[in-house]
Amino acid sequence: MPVGQDFVNEWFIGSRFVGRVLGETMVGGRPAVLPSVTGRAWITGTAQYLLDPSDPYPAGFTL
């Protein structure tokens, strides 16, 4: 997406968000963009995740 061009995302229920690349930069030696997103949203829930210090698998496990 070119710098300065809008990307409009509209859904059939009428919600609308506009994204734009404001510029380009480098982060940690890698190319990155400076994004802008405008629109309106509502909080529909929150969550809190805890890690017990005695958990023997704090990063999970793989089968």
Image (cartoon, helix red, strand yellow):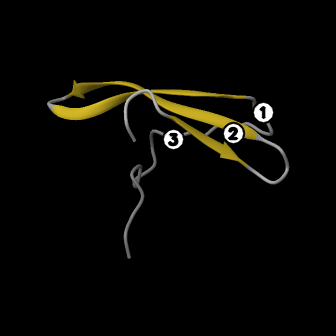
Give the camera-side residue of 23 and 44. Answer: 23
Closest to the camera, between mark 3 and mark 2, is 2
Asked whether, in this view, residue 33 is left or right of residue 52, the answer is left
Task: Tell me the residue at 23%/27% (across/down).
Answer: 27
Above/below status of 34 relative to 45: above
Q: Which mark is residue 51?
A: 3
* Mark 1 or mark 3: whose residue is earlier in sequence: 1
The residue where tag 2 is placed is: 47
Q: Which corner quadrant of the image does residue 19 belong to?
A: top right
Q: Which corner quadrant of the image does residue 60 belong to?
A: bottom left
In the rendered structure, which amino acid carries the disc numbered 1?
A: Ile
Give the camera-side residue of 37 and 44. Answer: 37
Above/below status of 63 relative to 24: below
Mark 2 touching mark 1, by CB under 8 A? Answer: no
Mark 1 touching mark 3, by CB under 8 A? Answer: no
Q: CA distance from mark 1 to mark 3?
A: 24 Å
Task: Tell me the residue at 75%/29% (across/down).
Answer: 40
10 Å crowding of disc 2: few (<14), some (14-19), many (20+): few
The residue where tag 1 is placed is: 43
Q: CA distance from mark 2 to mark 1?
A: 11 Å
Closest to the camera, between mark 2 and mark 1, is 1
Percent x, y of residue 44: 80, 39
Q: Which corner quadrant of the image does residue 16 belong to?
A: top right
Residue at the far left in the pictured view: 29
Asked whether, in this view, residue 13 is left or right of residue 46, the answer is right
Tell me the quadrant of the picture where the C terminus can be found.
bottom left
Percent x, y of residue 11: 75, 51
In the rendered structure, which amino acid carries the disc numbered 3?
A: Leu
In the rendered structure, which amino acid carries the disc numbered 2?
A: Ala
Number of marks drawn: 3
